[in-house]
Image (tube, rainbow, N blue to C red):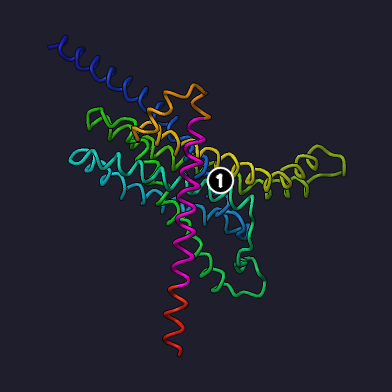
């Protein structure tokens, strides 16, 4: 009886070791998309009134957790009854990631004007208007998080797709939870950088005090940190997308084996190339749709 109990403990320990190893692999695979998730959420969580930053971030965090609660069971059901769907979603997600990365590079090379949104710190707005705009931005952030959460869950699940369902559930759930806590915890620190800086400047007693120097550094660093995260996130998006294409599309897999260059360059090149192709099709579709819409509008007004 005792020996059977210790065998059971040994089996549990072995399973936990396997889960730990697979969780590390899944974390590495999802690191790229987490970088973009961090950059996107840091940008969306900034720009609020100082007193509202943390409440807004908490609302978005709860929405993110709910997103993953919705996504995880669906992903596990697909893995159990239709595993090929996971590969298809992975490739489709890769195309979306590649498009996102290529669009950011295109926007940097060929910038165009965006419509300026009404700032929620505008003194002319009433409290009700501020809260209404705030709710809209929270909803937008949660929708964006849903897309990113799907990608994180599917990529994490894709790394353990050949493992038993129990281990798939444990590993993917761990990654989803760590992603939510880790990303929004770091975002909270980032968006409060300037506030911490202002407080240090306020309490400094002289112009050359260390606290004033650190405060100024934190205030000036915030926009640079967000920009740096955006650049890192863009590169990571293309690398993750390229990695998906190289591993799951036979043509790119064979091509990558024939070309003797570092895998990171292969994956980035493949991700960027397919991203630009998708971007071209999306832009053409937008132009065609606008022309059709204009013709329909002219007929109705004629």
21 relative position to 99: left or right: left
- Residue farthest to the right? 207
Residue sitting at 52 percent across and 43 percent down? 36
73 relative position to 1: left or right: right
Looking at the image, is 300 positioned above or below residue 94? below
Looking at the image, is 109 positioned above or below residue 267? below
Q: Residues within 10 Å of mark 1 (few under 14, many from 20)?
A: many
Figure quadrant of residue 4: top left
- Residue farthest to the bottom? 302
Along the viewing direction, whichever of 202 and 21 lies nearer the viewer:
21
- Residue farthest to the top? 3
Residue sitting at 23 percent across and 38 percent down? 83
Residue sitting at 73 percent across and 50 percent down? 198
In x, y percent, where is residue 302?
45, 90
Q: Is residue 178 magenta?
A: no
In x, y percent, where is residue 128?
54, 74
Find the magenta span and give its range: 266-291
Residue sitting at 48 percent across and 32 percent down? 267
Along the viewing direction, whichever of 300 and 237 lies nearer the viewer:
300
Q: How many marks?
A: 1
- Residue farthest to the left? 1
Along the viewing direction, whichever of 129 and 104 lies nearer the viewer:
104
42 relative position to 89: left or right: right
Principal secondary structure, stretch drawn in magenta: helix
Give the residue number, with chain letter if any, for mark 1.
39
Helix, strand or loop at label 1? It is helix
In x, y percent, where is residue 150?
37, 46
């Amino acid at each position: 009886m005792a020996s059977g109990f210790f065998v059971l403990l040994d089996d549990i320990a072995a399973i936990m070791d396997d889960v730990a190893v697979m969780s590390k692999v899944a974390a590495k695979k999802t690191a790229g998309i987490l970088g973009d998730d961090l950059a996107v959420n840091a940008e969306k969580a900034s720009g609020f009134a100082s007193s509202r930053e943390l409440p807004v971030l908490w609302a978005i965090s709860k929405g993110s957790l709910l997103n993953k609660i919705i996504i995880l069971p669906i992903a596990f059901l697909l893995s159990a009854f239709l595993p090929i769907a996971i590969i298809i979603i992975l490739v489709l997600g890769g195309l979306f990631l590649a498009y996102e990365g290529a669009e950011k590079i295109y926007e940097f090379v060929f910038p165009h004007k965006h419509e300026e949104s009404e700032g929620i710190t505008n003194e002319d707005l009433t409290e009700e208007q501020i809260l209404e705009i705030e709710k809209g931005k929270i909803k937008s952030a949660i929708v964006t998080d849903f897309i990113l959460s799907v990608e994180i869950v599917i990529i994490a699940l894709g790394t353990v797709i050949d493992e038993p369902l129990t281990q798939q559930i444990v590993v993917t759930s761990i990654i989803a939870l760590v992603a939510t806590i880790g990303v929004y915890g770091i975002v909270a620190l980032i968006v409060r950088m300037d506030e911490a800086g202002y407080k240090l400047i306020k309490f400094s007693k002289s112009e050359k005090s260390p606290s004033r120097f650190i405060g100024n550094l934190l205030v000036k660093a915030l926009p640079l940190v967000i920009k740096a995260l955006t650049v890192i996130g863009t590169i990571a998006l293309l690398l993750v997308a390229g990695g998906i294409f190289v591993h799951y599309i036979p043509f790119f897999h064979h091509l990558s084996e024939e070309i003797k260059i570092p895998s990171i360059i292969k994956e980035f090149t493949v991700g960027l190339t397919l991203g630009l192709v998708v971007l071209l099709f999306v832009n053409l579709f937008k132009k065609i749709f606008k022309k059709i819409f204009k013709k329909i509008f002219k007929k109705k007004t004629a």
